[in-house]
Image (cartoon, rainbow, N blue to C red):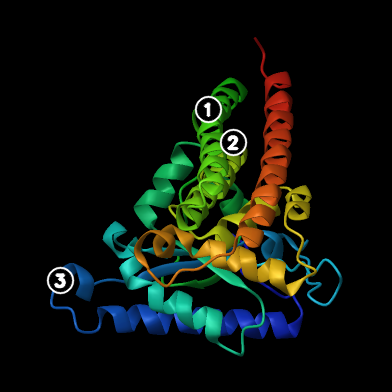
Amino acid sequence: MKTSIDHLPEHKQAELARVVEILHAEFEDALSESSADWKKSGRILKIILFGSYARGDWVDEPNTMKGYRSDFDVLVVVNNNKLADFAYWYKAKDRLERDRAIKTPTSFIVHSRRFVNTALRQGQYFFTDIRREGVVLYELDDEPLAEPKALTPKDAYQTAKDHFGDRFPGAKGFLDTFLYVLKQDRKKEAAFQLHQAIEHNYSTLLLVLTNYSPPSHKLTFLRSLAEDQDRRLFEAWPREQQRHRAWFNTLNEAYVKARYSKHYLISEEALVWLGERTAELHKRAEQTCLEHLARMKEAVSW
C-alpha cells in the first residue's frame, strides 16, 4: 500500500497528522482505566486514508455557491473486533469535529484486521479499493492486509442486484410513511421516518456500488461516502443557504432525538423541504444503481 501523502497540500498533511494524533490519544484514553486483558492489549494496527484524498481527486470549495468539500475518509484497523464498538470512539469523533486545527470534515470507520482480511478474501470491493488506492498514515507493524479475491462478474452482479432488490424498496417505504405522518402533523415521527429514508437510500447505494455499508446512522457520514462514489448525488442537497444546511443537520440528529428527546424540534417548513430533497435523492440514487447494475450485467458471460 502507498505510504506517502506528498500529493496533498502541506496544510492538508498537517490536518491529517492531527487526525492521527487525536485517534491515538482518545483510543488510549478509552482503554486507560480498563482491567480486562483484551482491553489492555488493545492496539491500533493501521490508520489508512481512503477515498478522494487518497486518490487525489478531492474537492475543497467551501466558499463557492455550491459549497462542496470532500471529507477525509479514514479506516482504523484494530487488533480485536470488540474494539470497533462506538463506545471506544465517540470521544474521538467529537474531538475531530471540534478541533480547530482540522478544517476538513473527517469521517472514520473502525474494524479489526480479521474483519478487513475476511472481507478482502470474500472479494468485497470496498475494502479491495482501499487496499489498492489507500494511503497508510500509521501502522504498528509491517504485516500487510490480505490479498483480495476478485469476485466473478456474475457473482458481483448477482450480489449487487440482491442488495438493490432487498434494500431499495425499504428506503421508498420510509419515504411513503414520512409523507403520511407529516400529514398527521406528527413532526418528530416524520423526522425519524425521513432520517431512515435517507439512511437506507445511502446504504443501498453503497452496498450496490461497493458491497459494503458502514454500521452508522450518521447521515453526514453516509452522504460523504455516497457522494464520493457518484458526485451527481451532491446535487440532491443544495448547500448554498445556511438554513438548508441547518435543516439537514437537525435531521441528522433525528435517529435518537426525534424518538427520545422532548426538546427535539423541527419545523414543518424544514420537513417539507427535506422531504422534497429526499425524493430527489431517491431518483438520483436509483439511477446510479440501475446504471451500475446495467454495466455489471453487460460484463457477465451468460
* 245 horizontally vs 263: left or right: right
Q: Which mark, residue 208?
A: 2
The amino acid at mark 1 is: Thr
Graded by Cα atoms within 10 Å as few (under 14), some (14 to 19) or many (20 or more), the crowding at tag 2 reads: many
Q: Secondary structure at mark 3?
A: helix
Task: Give the quadrant of residue 142.
Answer: bottom left
Describe residue 299's horizontal placement relative to residue 17 as left or right.
Answer: right
Task: Tell me which label, 3 or 1, sits earlier in the chain.
Answer: 3
The secondary structure type at the circle numbered 1 is helix
> Which quarter of the rendered picture does the N terminus lie within?
bottom right
Q: How many marks?
A: 3
Marks 1 and 2, how far apart at CA: 8 Å
In percent of width and height, residue 199 lies at 53, 49
**Residue type for callout 3:** Asp
Q: Which residue is mark 1?
A: 159
Q: Which sits in the foreground, 86 or 128?
A: 86
Image location (x, y in percent) of residue 272: 66, 53
Q: Amino acid at mark 2?
A: Val
Residue drawn at the location 68% of the way across and 40% of the way down:
285
User: Which residue reaches farthest front?
Assistant: 184
Q: Residue 141: give x, y in percent of width and height.
A: 41, 69
Q: Residue furthest bottom?
A: 100
Determine crowd level at label 3: few under 14, some 14-19, many 20+ residues with C-alpha closer than 10 A.
Answer: few
Asked whether residue 135 appears in the rendered view, the answer is: no
Q: Quadrant of residue 259?
A: bottom left
User: Viewer-nearest of labels 3 and 1?
Assistant: 1
The residue at 54%/85% (across/down) is 98
Residue 37, disc: 3
Say above or below: 261 vs 291.
below
Q: Residue at x 78, y 53 (%)?
A: 235
Q: Nearer the viewer, residue 262 or 45?
A: 262
N-term mark: 1 or 2: 1
